[in-house]
Structure formats: C-alpha cells, structure tokens
Amino acid sequence: MKGSRFRKLFLAGRDLPLGRDASSRFLVWIIGFMVILGSLSLASAMLLSDVGQGWRDELAGKLTVQIMPEADGEDAATTLDLRVRMAEQFLVGRPGIARVETLADSRIAMLLEPWLGPQSREDALPMPKLIDVQLEPGSGIDIPDLTRRLAELIPGSAIDDHGVWLTRLLTLTGAVETTALSILGLILLAATATVVFTTRAGLAIHDKEIELLHLVGAEDHYIAHQFQAHALTLSFKGGIAGSLVAAVALTALGFIGQGSAIGMIPPITLSVSQWLVLALLPLATSLIATLTARLTVMRSLARMS
Amino acid sequence: MDRKKDVVRFQNVGMRYGLGPEVFHDMSFGVKAGSFRFLVGPSGAGKSTLLKLMYLAHRPSRGLIHMFGHDTATVARKDMPAMRRRIGVVFQDFRLIDHLSALDNVALPLRVAGANEEQLSDHVAELLRWVGLENEIHSLPSRLSGGQQQRVAIARAVIGRPDLLLADEPTGNVDNTIAMRILYLLEELNKIGTTVIIATHNEALISRFKFPQLRIEDGRVIDTGAETGAPASRTTNEAAGRGS
Ligand SMILES: Nc1ncnc2c1ncn2[C@@H]1O[C@H](COP(=O)(O)OP(=O)(O)OP(=O)(O)O)[C@@H](O)[C@H]1O
Ligand SMILES: [Mg+2]
C-alpha cells in the first residue's frame, strides 16, 4: 500500500525520460538565479517600505520652530534668547501641543557641522535657535495659522513641519519600492516563460514517446503530470538553492550595515515575518512553474490532432 | 443489427498521406467481434496504414470508420483514451520506450489506466514468463535481441486484455518455434473474446493456422471470411481460409 502511494506521488510518470534532457539542468540554474534576484528585489522593497514607515513615524507629529538671529548687535544673543523664551511661552500649553524643547546650541552646532565645518566659538556665525515641538497624536492642529501667529509675535520665526521633505522622500522610496516589486514581477514572468519554453522543448524531444502514451490510452493529464512533476522538482531545487544564496547575501549585508553607522539609513535587518515572506518566494516559484508546465502541456496536446 | 456487432467497420474509406497518392480508395469491410483475421498483401499494399486507421493514429481522407460501433470522426478527444484502451497494438517497429525495463514497458497500458501497482507487477511478470522472457524482466530494450523486443511489444499489447488486438508483423523477428508460440498465445486471447487482426507475410503461419484473411489488393480489401459469415474458430474456417 505505502509503496504504491509513494510511487504515485513521487515517482509516477517516469515514463518520459525528462530528467535526461539538457534543459533540466538549465532550468534549475535559471530558477536558482531568478529566485536570488527575486529575493533581493523583494527584500529591498520590504526594507524600503520599513524606511519610509520609520521616517513617517519619526516625523509625524513633529514640528521644528526656527528662530533666526537678528542683525548683529551687542545684545543680539540676549535678544535671541528672549525671543526663544517668548516662543516657548507661546507654544507651551497650547491645545494639541504635547512637548516643547529648545535644542542646546551645542546640539545645533553638531547638526550643522557636516555643512559648516567645526567652528571656533569666537568667530562663530550667528546660529538660529531650534525648538522641537511634539504634537499630541491626532491633534489636527492648524499649522499655517500657528505659523502666522507666531511670526506676528516673533518676527524671524518659522515653523517647519517636515511635510515637504517627508513627502519627497516618501515619493522617492515609494518609487524605488515599486521598481523593486516590478522587477520581482518581471523575474517571475521570465521564470514562467522559461518553463513554457523548456516544457515545449520537452514535448518536442519526446514526441515519439508521447504519441505512444496516447496510443496505449494515456489521457493528456497523465502526460501533463509527468511534466509538472518534473518542473516541480527542478524549480524546487533551484528555488531552495537560490533562496539560501539570497539569505546568505542579505545576512552578510546586514552585518556590513551594522558596522557602518550611517544615520539616515536604517540597518539592513529583516523581521521574522519578512524572512517568512522571502521563504515563500521559492515555494511560489515552484507553484508557478508546476502550473505553467501543466497548462503548457495540456494546451499543446489539445492543439495536436 | 449485424453492424452493431462489428468491432471494425470501414465504409468507402479513402486514405492518402499528405498530398501523396491514395493508398486506399473506396474501402469497405467489417470485422465481427470475436473473429481472427490475417491481414495480407504485398509490401507497400497498405497493411500498416490500415492498422493505423484502426488504432486511431490516422484519420481517413474520406469515408467512415466505425470502431466498436462508434463513428471515429465524431468521437470527442476526451473519449479517445478510453477507446484506445480497448485496442492493443503490436507495432511493426515495436515502439518500446528505451529507458524503461521490459517490465515497465509492458506495464504501461495498465499504468496509464491507473491500475494498482502491486497487482500490476505480478501480472506483468507472469505474462513476460509466458512469452519466454522470465530472465529479461528488468532488462532495457537496448539489451534485448530483436525477437525479445518483439515479445515485449506483444506482451504490452495483450496485457490490458483488449477487445481488439492489432498486430503488425508480430513474428517478423522470431524463429518459427517462437512465432508459433506467439500465435498460440494470440489464439488463446481470441478464445476469451478478443478480436485479433494480424498483418503478416509469414506464409508458414498463414498456412498453418488457416484463419480467414483480409487481403489488400489494389487499394481494396477482400475478406476471405466474409462469404461464409462464419465465426472465428480456425477449424470451422479451414475451407474459407484456403478459398479465393
Ligand atoms: N508516413 C507515411 N508517409 C507517406 N507515405 C507513407 C507513410 N507510410 C506509408 N506510406 C506509403 O503508404 C503505402 C502503404 O504503406 P504501408 O506501410 O501501409 O504498407 P505495408 O503493407 O504495411 O507494407 P510492409 O508489408 O512493407 O510493411 C506505401 O506506398 C508507403 O510508401
Ligand atoms: Mg507494414
């Protein structure tokens, strides 16, 4: 009993020597490479989506109030401090505002250092003051109105809600993400086409045997089964190998990314669910290959005679 | 009502390959269920072609062919496998699958019909013993002599107990002793109900077994068993077999 079921499931239909065709080895490699490329595209898409989400989370509900220093004067610094305090007073306790924090000069200097270079304290350029404002979640605060009223009170003040910047970045990451997913789609399409061609080649190579199978009463699906089992085996082998290579590459990239502390770029690490999505790719590819082989055979045989 | 019992019935059948000359024109005859016929005619007369039409490998250029009472022109593609399973064929060129053992080649008709694997291999091995290949059960066709391959082909044709057995020169590559044995096997098969048609040049067999003949002459068929309307048994057909 067991023996026969086993044969039916895994060995059934070895009447056609498909494994001996040169296209067999070729298909394993092609599928392997495609799954590597596909995994990398998919991983980039998922990582980019994370990056976008990270920026959105971080910047959503945040405002930066900027107070520009007035023209030089003896008491420029004092005036600036005074205006900052006025702005703080204006902001603190306003409905919808959760927290107000003026950044220390040293922090601002650090932020500007990449652009201005290290400055000595004496000949320092007059630097603006920055106030971080944290809004309450879902505050729905009217930012243009707030900006106008603050500017009336304190000339030379400005509010940046990072909206423009964030929108541009998200557009960019979104576009790259779409590109990565399109590449994945194209890769799957190419894999499908490859299976169609190798299956057709197999049908042509084995036309004598197929004719014989028909003559002894085989139905089309009996023949299709052999091709689909073959495609499943090959694409599964290639897919698993490709997936492993991609996993190693992604892990290595993750390690390299950890070493270099680039502020804006988050670490290249995937969550468990993202690894699972990647693990589905070879399975999906095998499924596509199997169905493609079946459809190709059924269609070709139906067209014959 | 006679027609209903015809396993094979040709009506005004014409056949040509591509644009070539007509191999047959206007061929009409019937073969009754349970009969045994030698199909004879000079080389190139169209014996293999006639069998190809019967085992549904070719369509006629014109005319009607009924197999088991069904008009082959109107049989749906999906019903073809079932009809073909009722027909066992020994091809002139054997058509064994090179990479399958004798056992697997013979098992093929059962496997495509979804037969149970355990029962299958005993059954197949037994039949291979019957045709004298008990030592070659696991051999590949390339390791077998022409005569041994032919016996594998015969075993494959009869394994499914077909209603109709078509054999194209089934004794072409074997010595007379084995040829006789094969004929006896086919005769046994005929006795349990299989209609048998054997294309052959083998005069020794024809004169020894004296079954009626389907004789192809000038693209037409003459059935030496038809006049008497007699059943298949060779004793009753002895006279008819020699006649005409
Ligand atoms: N595939 C084919 N394409 C074109 N012509 C063919 C084909 N097969 C057979 N013929 C032609 O049809 C005619 C009948 O051939 P067929 O093979 O049926 O003869 P046969 O009686 O079986 O001969 P033999 O006794 O030599 O086997 C011949 O003239 C042959 O040339
Ligand atoms: Mg012939």
Image: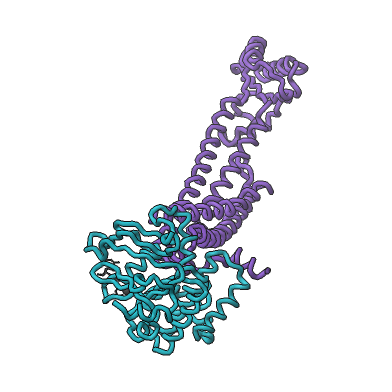
Question: Could you say where residue B29 lies in the image, as x and y percent from the top left?
Answer: 34, 65
- The chain drawn purple is chain what? A
- Up-down relation of residue A3 to residue A188 (above or below): below
Chain drawn cyan in the picture: B
- For this orientation, the residue located farthest to the top is A152
Residue B146: where, in percent of width, then height? 40, 83
Horizontal and vertical percent for residue A293?
49, 55
**Can you see residue A25?**
no
Identity of the residue drawn at 52% across and 52% down: A291
Query: Which residue corresponds to the image point at 60% horizontal and 25% vertical from the top-left?
Result: A163
Q: Is residue B26 visible?
A: yes
Q: Quadrant of ligand 1?
A: bottom left
Where is the C terminus of chain B found, in terms of image quarters?
bottom left
Q: Residue at x 54, y 64 (%)?
A: B113
Of residues A279 and A270, the one nearer the viewer is: A279
In screen coordinates, is A46 left or right of A97? Answer: left
On screen, residue A163 above or below B49: above
**Residue A57 image point, x, y percent:** 67, 32
Q: Residue at x 69, y 24 (%)?
A: A131
Query: In the rendered view, would you say B17 is above or below B101?
Result: above
On screen, residue A74 versus residue B227, left or right, reads right
For this orientation, the residue located farthest to the right is: A93
